[in-house]
Amino acid sequence: MKLLTVNVGRPRTVEYSDAPGGATGIDKRPADGPVRVADPGPKGEGASGVAGDTVCDLRHHGGSDQAVYAFAREDLDFWERELGRPLANGAFGENLTTSGLDITGAKIGERWRIGQDVVLETTSGRIPCRTFQGWLGERGWVRRFTRQAVTGAYLRVITPGEIRAGDAIEIVHRPAHDVTVAMSFRAVTLERELLPRLLAAGEALHPEELRTAREYAAGLGAGAGAVKLP
C-alpha cells in the first residue's frame, strides 16, 4: 500500500460553488516534494490539514475531523470506465490518492501511518455536493455517486509530519467494530435504519454523524441526517 500523490488546491471562482463568493479549492493537483500535514483546528476556524491546500467553504469542509480527504486510485479507475474519460490523481478533490488500500472499506477509527511519522484516522465518508457535481460536469452526479457509495474517506491528524508521493501506507490500528466508511455514508444518506449501528464506532466517528446516530437511536429524529438528492 502506498501514497501515489499528495494533492493541493488553489482557490478559483466558479458559478457552481456552494461557498460564499463562489470560490472553491476542489481543483487539486499533485504537489512536488514533501508536504506537511497537521491538525488545522476546529471546523469553521481551521481549513485544510494539508499545507498549501485551500478550503473555501468552512461551513462544510475542513477542520479537525475533515483535515484530509483520501481516495483510492482503484476507485478513480472504476469511475474512469463508468464515465468514459480519464481522471487524474486529485480529480475528485482528494488530498491523497492511494494505491492498494481499501479506503471505503476501512473502519471508522482505523489508523494509517504514512511515511515515517504521520498517522491519520478515518472519521467518515465524503458527502457529494453541488460543487463536486459542477466540477465534474456530470448531470445527476450527486445521486449517482451516492448510490454507488464508494466515497473515499475524511481523516483527522493523529500525528503530524511530512508526507510525499511514494510513501508507504501501513494500517497500524483497526477497530473491532464493524462500522466502515461505506456503512457510515449509507446510514446518513439512503439507509437511515443503519444509523444506530454507527454508535459502535463511538467518538471515532465524525461528531456530526455521531450526534445524528444518537438522535435517531433515541427516536428524536427519524429523518435526521438524511441527504436529499437532486
Image: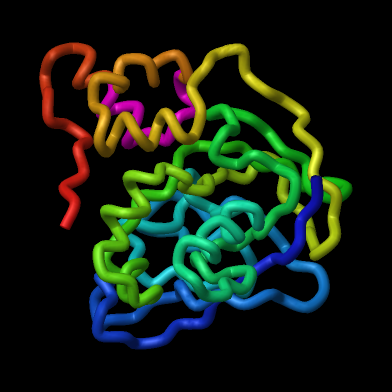
Would residue 118 be counted in the magenta stretch? no
In the picture, the quarter occupied by the C terminus is bottom left
Which portion, as a residue range, is magenta?
A: 202-213
Secondary structure character of the magenta stretch overall? helix
| Residue visible at 60% across and 62% down in the picture | 95
| Residue visible at 39% across and 58% down in the picture | 61
Q: Is residue 185 above or below residue 95?
A: above
User: Depth check: 162 or 197 in front?
Assistant: 197
Hey, which quadrant is residue 186 in on the image? top left
Residue 147: x percent and y percent? Answer: 33, 44
Residue 19: x percent and y percent? Answer: 27, 72
Q: Is residue 217 left or right of residue 222?
A: right
| Residue visible at 72% across and 50% down in the picture | 160
Q: Is residue 35 left or right of residue 155?
A: right
Would residue 205 be counted in the magenta stretch? yes
Q: Is residue 35 left or right of residue 75?
A: right
